[in-house]
Image (tube, rainbow, N blue to C red):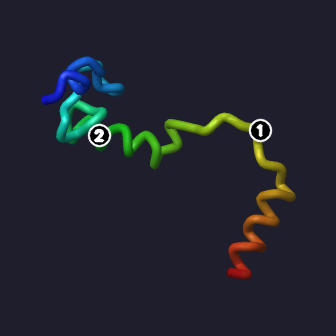
Amino acid sequence: MTPSAKAKPCPICKKPGSEDHSPFCSARCRDRDLARWFGNGYAVPGRPATPDEIAGENMQQDLD
């Protein structure tokens, strides 16, 4: 394990990070983080989309 991996704690459980699962300590924490993304546990800040923007996006996808 490199010194930089030891210096950064796992963002999920705060244990020392693992080089194999960087920046996480294990596959379990890596998978928990992925599940949060899939379950909308994380969000990118920004204003909410208007109904017109959503409708326009759906129409564009239909054309593709």
Residue 25, percent from left and from top: 21, 30
Q: Residue at x 18, y 40 (%)?
A: 20
Above or below: residue 61 compared with residue 45 = below
**Reading the chain from its start, which is encountered first: label 2 or label 1?**
2
Residue assigned mark 2: 30
The furthest residue to the bottom: 63
Question: Is residue 12 left or right of 53 when viewed as pictured?
Answer: left
Q: Residue at x 27, y 36 (%)?
A: 22
Question: Is residue 50 left or right of 21 when viewed as pictured?
Answer: right
Task: Look at the numbered disc 2 and give the secondary structure of its residue.
Answer: helix
Q: Residue at x 83, y 55 (%)?
A: 51
Residue 15, percent from left and from top: 22, 20
Q: Residue at x 27, y 33 (%)?
A: 24
Q: Residues within 10 Å of mark 2 (few under 14, many from 20)?
A: some
Q: Nearer the viewer, residue 1 or 54?
A: 1
Instruction: Quote the CA–CA distance across marks 2 and 1.
Output: 29 Å
The furthest residue to the right: 52
The N terminus lies in quadrant: top left
Task: Look at the numbered disc 1 and give the secondary structure of its residue.
Answer: loop
Report the amino acid beneath label 2: Arg
Question: Is residue 20 left or right of 58 when viewed as pictured?
Answer: left
Report the amino acid beneath label 1: Arg
The furthest residue to the front: 3
Residue assigned mark 1: 47
